Amino acid sequence: EVQLQASGGGLVQAGGSLTLSCAASGVSFGGRAIGWFRQAPGKEREGISCFSSSDGNIYYADSVKGRFAISSDNAKNTMYLHMNNLKPEDTAVYYCALDLTGYSSSKWYCDNNGMYYWGKGTLVTVSS
C-alpha cells in the first residue's frame, strides 16, 4: 500500500522560510512523478511544483517561481518543498502527491491535479 506522509508545516512570518517533507512508503520514487499542491481557504487546489520522469523537467507555478524549490532523496523515499520569502498568500494546506506512471509532463501533472496518490496535507500559515 502506498502512503505519503507530509510534515513540516507551521506558522511563519512573512519573509521567512520553511521546508516541508513528504515520506513515502510502499513505493520508490524512481521513474515516477512527484509534486506539491496546495489549497488555500475558499480556493481550489493548485499544483505548485511537479516533476515527471517523462520529461525530466521541474515545473513551478508562477506564484512560487523563484521562491520555492522541490527536491527528493530517492534513497530515503522522501521529497521536499523548500519555501523561501514566504508571503501571507502562501497560507494553505500543502499536499504531496505521487504518480506511479510518470507518463505525462511535469506541467500536466500540476495543471490537472493529475497525481494518483496523495498525502493528508500539512498546514502552512504565513503571518504578515
Image (cartoon, helix red, strand yellow):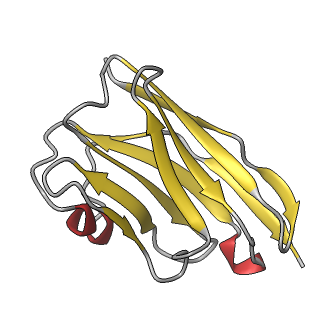
Residue lying at the far left of the rendered structure: 103
User: Which residue is rendered at x = 45% and y = 39% of the image?
Assistant: 72
Q: Quadrant of residue 39?
A: bottom right
Q: Is residue 100 left or right of residue 94?
A: left
Q: Examine the rendered structure and indicate whether residue 106 appears above or below residue 21.
A: below
Q: Examine the rendered structure and indicate whether residue 11 appears above or below residue 111.
A: above
Where residue 23 sits: x, y (%)? 51, 28
Q: Is residue 11 left or right of residue 56?
A: right
Where residue 120 sits: x, y (%)? 53, 40
Along the line of sight, the residue nearer the viewer: 60 or 40: 60
Q: Quadrant of residue 1?
A: top left
User: Which residue is rendered at x = 64% and y = 72% of the image?
Assistant: 41
User: Which residue is rendered at x = 26% and y = 43% of the image?
Assistant: 116
Location of the C terminus by quadrant is: bottom right
Q: Is residue 47 left or right of residue 29?
A: right
Number of labels in the image equals 0
Q: Is residue 42 left or right of residue 99?
A: right
